[in-house]
Amino acid sequence: MRVVNICTATQERSPGTVCLKMAATISSVQCMGKITENEMQRQTDVITSIKPIALPKGVKKLCELCKKPAFMQCLQCRVTFYCGSDHQTSDWEGIHDQICTQLIPLRSPEPHFSTESKRKEHADELFQQKRQLLQLTRAVGQKLLFEGKAEKAIPAVLQSLHFAIEVYGLSSIELVTSYLMLAEACIGLHRLKEAEDYLSQAQWTVLMVPDCDYRIKSQVHRQIGRLCEVKGDYEEALRHLAEDVYHCSIVTSTDDVETSGGYFHMGNIFLKLGKTDKAETLYYRVLKIWHKYLTGIVTFNVEEEEKSSSLLTSPKMINLGKAQEAEAVKVLSAIHAWYSEMSDRHQLEFSYSCKTQALLNFVIGDRSQAKVCAERALEALGDDEKKQHTRRAIASFLNLCRTTPQPSLSRR
C-alpha cells in the first residue's frame, strides 16, 4: 500500500462534549462480519496510509469514528481519515460508501470568491447539501436499526448527529432524533450506560424547548420504555410506552402507523409477563392499523396506474420510505411469526396476518411473495361459510397480485 503525504491543512472543529460521547460510543465498533475478496480489494483501492510527519506543524488528522489520531485516509475523497482498517471498514459499510464524494466540498478549504454575493451563494449551497446529507444519513441509520443491524447503523447515525450540529447548532431540538437513534443502537448492543447518556441528553434538550413537538416527546418516551424493558423494569417501561402512545396520538391518531409502534412494544412486554391475551389484543390492533394503511396505498396506486395508462402519463405512486419499509417488515414479521405459532387457536387472525403480509409485499414490489401470502391467507380460512365475505376480499386481492405486472427496479 503506497503512502500519500498530506500537505494541505484543513481546519479541525473542536469535538466538544457531544463528540467525546460519540467517540466513546464508536470506540468499540469493530469490523462487522466477513467480506468477500472483491469487496476487500475495493476498500483497499480507496484507502491508503498517511505520514503524520508530513503534516504541517500543529495539524492533526483524527479518525472519523473515534476521534483518535488517524493513520489512514480515504483515497477516493481524501478528506476522511481513520485510526485503522477496522474503523475504515465499519464506516465504509455503514455510510461512507454512500456519501464519500459528497464530503469533498464540505471539508475542503473555501475557495476565493471575487464578490461577497458569490461567497454567500457558495455558503448557501453547502448548507443545503448538509441538510440533504442529514436526511440521508438519518434514513440509512434508521433503516439499519429497524433491520436489527445496530452496530452497522452507528456510523450513519453519528454522521447524522454531525450534520445536525453543523446545520442547527448544539442546543437545537433537531439533535434529539440522532440522540435517540444512538440510544437505540446502544440498547441493541446492550451498552446500556451509553444509551442512558444519550437519552439524558435528549430529555435535557426537550426540557429546554417549551413548545417541543409531540412527536419528539413520543420518540423520547418510546426509547426510554425500550431501555426499561431491556433492564427488566416492565412496569416503568409500560408507563413510558403509554406516554409514547398518548403524545403520538395528539398529532396523528390512536390508530395511525406512527402510534402503532408503541402498541407493538407494549405487546412484547405483556408477552414477557405471560399476559398473552393483552399481547394478542395489541398485536391485532397493530395488524389492523397496518392493514388499513397498506390497503390505502394499494388502492391509490392501482387507480393511479389505470388513470395514467388511459392518459399515457407517468403514474404518481405512493411508496414506503426505506426506514418505514424496514419498520413494517420488522413489526409485521414479528407479529406474523407469533400468529404462525398460534394458528390453530387464532385461525382468523393468522389469515389476517397473512393478508397484511401480502399487502406489504405488494407495496414494496414483490408480487410473487404477495401472491404466496394471499394464498396462505385463503388456505387458513378453510371452508367456513361465515367467512365467505373475507374469502372474497382475499380472492380479489389474489387476482390483483396475479394480473399486476412486477414493477421495474426504477420504480420500486
Image: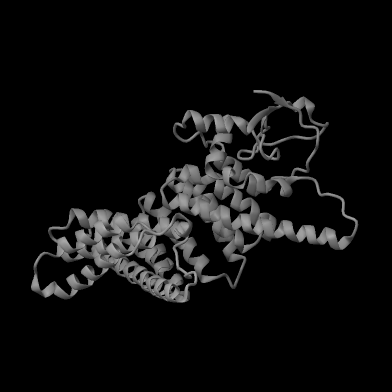
**Residue 123 percent coordinates (x, y):** 77, 58
Residue displayed at 84% across by 60% down:
118
Look at the image and tell me whether residue 237 can be seen: yes
**Residue 309 percent coordinates (x, y):** 43, 72
Asked where in the image residue 333 lies, by quadrant, the reply is bottom left
Residue displayed at 80% across by 46% down:
109
Asked where in the image residue 114 lies, by quadrant, the reply is bottom right
**Residue 406 percent coordinates (x, y):** 36, 58
Depth check, front residue: 222 or 343: 343
User: Is the N terminus in the top left, top right, bottom left or bottom right quadrant?
Assistant: top right
Q: Is residue 153 left or right of residue 79?
A: left
Depth check, front residue: 207 or 22: 22
Depth check, front residue: 242 or 110: 110
Residue displayed at 67% across by 56% down:
130
Q: Is residue 102 left or right of residue 30?
A: right
Asked where in the image residue 278 lies, by quadrant, the reply is bottom left
User: Is the C terminus in the top left, top right, bottom left or bottom right quadrant?
Assistant: bottom left
Q: Is residue 123 left or right of residue 64?
A: right
Look at the image and tell me whether residue 169 can be seen: no
Q: Is residue 394 above or below residue 122?
A: below
